Image (tube, rainbow, N blue to C red):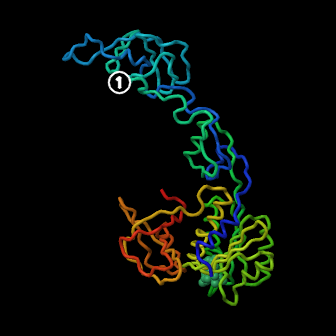
Amino acid sequence: MIEYAEALAMVLAAAKSLPAETVPLAAALGRTLARDVKAREAVPPFTKATMDGYAVRAEDTRAPAAAAPGQGRAVVELAVLEDLPAGRVSRRSVGAGQAVRIMTGAPLPRGADAVVMVEDTEAAGRTVRVRRQVKPGDNIGLLGEDLGKGELALAKGTLIGPAEIGLLAAAGQARVPVARRPRLTVIATGDEIVEPGERRGRGRIRNANGPALTAMALQAGADASYLGIARDRDASLAARLARTKGADVVVLSGGVSVGDYDLVKGGLGSSGVRPVFWQVRIKPGKPVFFGRRGRQLVFGLPGNPTSSLVTFLLFVRPALDRLLGRTAAGAPAGRAVLDEAVAVKPGRTQFLRGRLVGPGPVLKVAPYPDQRSGVLRSMVHGRVLIVVPAGASRLEAGREVEILFADGRSS
Ligand code: AMP
Ligand code: MG
């Protein structure tokens, strides 16, 4: 049996990034950038007003010496050259004693170096009275202040979320180079397993893992498909495995223990899967199997629903991240303080299902009271795994621990 870190290293070593493809920006959500993207255009592409008001030369707004103290606020009067709405470029140049009435988003006219907010002015025919002094740069956005032309907008390996889409759009990027989504196939196994919508006979249970693992794969960015339930017979498993040829990743649930009907390892061997490891010193999920068939990665996850989902997070998710060329591989890790003591049997690295308890300022975490691997509610209850090192038998309340965010979001 090998340690968790060793097993993870073997998975990562086997998972190479997939080739790139180009997609329209609107389809890039949740994808991973396959190349560095440099800004085609500066953002913003010109220096602009960030307030409605008057574009001026800041030095012209200095209070005149005549405005003696005690006579109210100083007022400067400037000649208004024109009105400038957003989207129009001024042909005029603002000279001494002059101003242009400008709207938010309009390009700053030549000569001006600041905008006086409309609230600090008083229009008077073709002139404006300015009641507050401004400094150069006030109420304007500088050309390229968000992103200079040619500057790195987003680095290769970045997961594209809504803000990244906004930045790419702002820089004029209509199509985006992304990693191809890994094709992942899920197969459930077991004579006792019945799909949720079907009649359940005596002694049989619902298929929780098929849908849950498919969902995890989708959430991790894979192009996931589900191949149904293989029965605990070599022929049934072989028939399903025969349909996984085009998959980058195959995930099976159940049948990897040492029971008489645990056929997965043998069945995988007969269909050309070379084993890399079987059994890892972790809890839950000890019987997990990993093998390869050419470039295809094959995971046999234990059937207990919690073991299945935890081992997906620990091994399959990092592999998918690598296939996608993501900068970070695996569930995001963090640190938190135990809200209560936990006692465990030493010997294996444990991944307790827990939840964050609020409110801050310190991130606190509490384990679900029932940690048996058949109890899937432990994973519905919270979104974190508490990592308990193999040597530990008791961790006191207040102790800092490593946590993994099971839903892939750390904030
Ligand atoms: P196995 O790993 O096949 O020995 O299964 C371990 C336990 O998990 C057994 O109690 C199975 O009935 C249960 N199990 C296996 N596959 C699934 C599944 N797809 N959904 C829910 N429970 C399962
Ligand atoms: Mg089984």
| Residue positioned 52% across, 83% down in the render | 347
Q: 31 or 288: nearer the eye?
A: 288
On-image quarter of the N terminus: bottom right
Report the residue marked by disc 1.
Answer: 119
Q: Can residue 206 be seen from the camera position used here?
A: no
In the shown orientation, is residue 138 left or right of residue 132?
Answer: right
Q: What amino acid is labelled 1 in the image?
A: Glu
| Residue positioned 67% across, 79% down in the render | 278
| Residue 19 location, quadrant | bottom right
| Residue 243 location, quadrant | bottom right
Q: Position of residue 18 (x, y in %)?
A: 72, 57
Q: Position of residue 46 (x, y in %)?
A: 55, 26
Does 126 appear above or below 192?
above
In the shown orientation, is residue 240 left or right of residue 35?
Answer: right
| Residue found farthest to the left | 70
Q: Can residue 157 be seen from the camera position used here?
A: yes
Q: 220 or 224: nearer the eye?
A: 220
Crowd tier of the residue under label 1, counting other residues whose Cα lies within 10 Å: few below 14, some 14–19, many 20 or above: few
* Ligand 1 quadrant assignment: bottom right
